[in-house]
Amino acid sequence: MQAAGHAERGFRLLMEKYQVRLYWQIRRLVYDHEDANDVLQNCMVKVFRSIHTFEGKSKLYTWLYRIATNEAITFINRKKTNIAAPLDSTGQPLSEQLRADPYFEGSEAQLKLQAAIAQLPDKQKLVFNLRYFDEMSYADMSEVLGTSEGALKASFHHAVKKIESYLKGVEIF
């Protein structure tokens, strides 16, 4: 009984340390606050159930990011294939969705940046978010995404160029 208490306390401390970072990683992928909370809950359940399988071959936070990223991708894919609930169920452009979101406190520049990021292919979006917002190293991203550092650098470079073009009004997507 005491071991279970220690495990719960350890999990609680782990979540206190990483929950906000994981939330924002997920939120930048799924955009909606409520969806991000749902995905975060799924992520936390998965971490709780599989923490005993963590072998320490990678950093703990990269392992957590990998789980969070995979859960977000799974959520997005499910939403895309669910005909009854299209990805943009409101019919509004992303900028309007974000303006209407009471949890989004960004400026007009941040809205434009989010709209530019939304146009990126999924892989570039992931790489850009991890590098730009989380300031994650390419080595850590390689662990999270299972991709070579060189490929990640190329994806980030292409993402930055596409975002710059979008913000200048020249679409290269």
Image: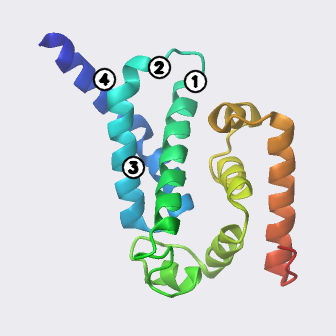
Task: Mark 3 and mark 1 in contact? Answer it, CB < 8 Å.
Answer: no
Name the residue that disc number 4 marks: 10
Work out whether 88 lies above or below 134: below
Residue 94 position by quadrant:
bottom right
Q: Nearer the viewer, mark 4 or mark 2?
A: 2
Which three-letter amino acid code belongs to the residue tagged 1? Lys
Q: CA distance from mark 2 to mark 3?
A: 19 Å
Q: Secondary structure at mark 4?
A: helix
Q: Nearer the viewer, residue 17 or 35?
A: 35
Q: Mark 3 or mark 1: name the one nearer the start of the chain.
A: 3
Q: Amino acid at mark 4?
A: Gly
- Residue under pointer 2: 54
Q: Secondary structure at mark 2?
A: loop
Distance of label 3 from label 1 (alpha carbons): 19 Å
First reached walking from the N terminus: tag 3 or tag 4: 4
Place residue 112 in its image quadrant: bottom right
Residue 31 at least partly seen: no
Residue behind mark 3: 40
Q: Are marks 2 and 1 in contact (CB under 8 Å)?
A: no
Disc with the residue nearer the chain's start (2 vs 1):
2
Choose the circle earlier in sequence order: 4 or 1: 4
Q: Amino acid at mark 3?
A: Leu
Image quadrant where one finds the N terminus:
top left
